[in-house]
Amino acid sequence: MAAAMNGTAPIEPPSELYQGRRAALPLDIVVVGCGLGGLAAAFCLAMAGHKVTILESVATIGEIGAGIFVGPNVTRLLIRWGLGKRLREVAVKPEARTVRRWCTGETLSWAQWGDPMAKKYGAPPYHVHRADLHRMLYDLAEPHVNIRTNCRVVSMNPSIPTLMLKSGEVVHADLVIGADGLKSTMRHFVVGTPDELRFTGDTAYRAVLPTEILLADPDLRSLVETPEITTWLGPQRHVVAYNIRAKEEYNIALCYTDRSPPAELWRIEESADRMKEEFVGWEPRIQKLLSLIPSTLKWKLMDRAPLETWIHEDGKLALLGDACHPMLPYAGQGAAMALILNLPRTYSELNFTGGQIEDAAVLGNLFSRLSSRAQIAPLLHAYEAIRYERATNTQAFSRLSKATLHLPDGLEQEQRDTKMRAAMEDTLKKAGGEVVVSGTDTNTKGNTDHWNNEKRIAIQLGHDADEEAEKWWHQRGESEIGPLRVPSTL
């Protein structure tokens, strides 16, 4: 495992999930990929009563990256799986979300998060280091699944299904879940045609600082003492920063339009001086933060087009997470930075983080009902039916978000900022008990400050993937898939 914060809180896996159901017909399931989505899917399918093996291509399992936001829609699932104590130990609950102007630091938007959000949606929001979340999911899944490393899949027969490893070994399964990320091999077997990655034109710098350095500076101390997600919006650039690891570290991500030619390597170590050149003229706190970073990782932001289907035509291979709906950071960061696009409903009412965790929960829930081989393909298509629109719309939103985040200074930027200030004023008035009647009321359709629109937030963060799976079964599955219960031997 890669370096992770040493959480000591016990993991308390549930005695039962899915209302106590376990599949009457256990399958041999192979999950390709041991990232966040693969571990979550393996755990959920094991809890549903199946025998699960994870095939991971690398020799040493770990997770790279830095901080990520997990909203109540995700934490409710993690807590349900027994990770509540570990999350409280290593994560940070953001008290608010603040958006600032790049050159002055002026507050453009503010919304309260923390305990009020947790109370409203039944689970807390957290910032967590990706490696810590990966460690939790690994510890959760490992007792229940067979995790095999150094097992690179080089070919597959999706009809049987069988997988050929680089070693020459052939692995047989009843069902294969492709959770092998943005560079997915399994995606090629579903698509069947060339499906190349494309460079978005943007690059991100990422860095993590010890918070003791910030606490020693009067201008930076408040960034730690009052844990918030703070975003600075500027021309062709934005910065997002927040606390992670029980406020022991401060995570910084800086995104900019990159006019250099695409490189073969997506992730390289870059000098701090080169990074600073991209953010000349930004407000003093940004300059101070940059001066504390000795070196940084530079990430080319890559993307894939949405798929028409996540399921192979023979119904024994399905994709999950970044293998089928990779997300650019504009969605998660853009929402948390008060995106002000006045989008149609299909783009505005979305989940912004944790799609692969929701995918896993739905898969496990549905396959807890399996009692016949004839139900495998229909249950996979049910998974896709439940998850496809939500995930694919999020992909579309993430692409649309870039333009609004990176507006050049001028009329459009001024209009954006004016709307954000107005929405913030209404939020503060309502928090003080005033009745808001203006056109920027946070409950009105015209509100363009995304994270100050209560109706949109409820759909995003109030989502429960298990409840959606249960609802789908009672509305459609019981009549469409239930009758397929017949004696079966595999």
Image (cartoon, helix red, strand yellow):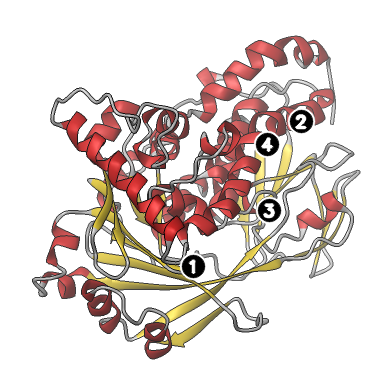
Residues at badges 2 and 3 in contact (C-beta under 8 Å)? no
Q: Is residue 428 left or right of residue 191?
A: left
| Quadrant occupied by the C terminus | top right
Give, as a three-letter code, the residue at label 3: Ala
Residue 258 picture location, percent across and down: 56, 77
Q: Which residue is mark 3?
A: 323
Residue 285 drawn above or below residue 71: below
> For the image shown, how many numbered marks are present on the structure?
4
The residue tagged with tag 4: helix, strand or loop?
Answer: helix
Picture quarter containing residue 103? bottom left
Of badges 3 and 1, the one in the foreground is 3
Q: Which residue is mark 2?
A: 381
The residue tagged with tag 2: helix, strand or loop?
Answer: helix
Q: Is residue 110 left or right of residue 81?
A: left
The residue tagged with tag 3: helix, strand or loop?
Answer: helix
Q: Which residue is mark 4?
A: 388
Which numbered disc, 1 or 4, marks the residue that appears first in the sequence?
1
Of badges 1 and 4, the one in the foreground is 4
Residue 383 visible: yes
Which numbered disc, 3 or 1, marks the residue that appears first in the sequence?
1
Residue at the spot 43% in from the left edge and 58% down from the top edge: 411
Give, as a three-letter code, the residue at label 4: Tyr
3D distance between C-alphas at marks 3 and 4: 13 Å
3D distance between C-alphas at marks 2 and 3: 16 Å
Residue 65 drawn above or below residue 277: above
Q: Which one is in front, 485 or 63?
A: 63
Residues at badges 3 and 4 in contact (C-beta under 8 Å)? no
Give, as a three-letter code, the residue at label 1: Ile
Q: Which residue is mark 1?
A: 64
3D distance between C-alphas at marks 1 and 4: 27 Å
Residue 177 picture location, percent across and down: 71, 45
3D distance between C-alphas at marks 1 and 2: 32 Å
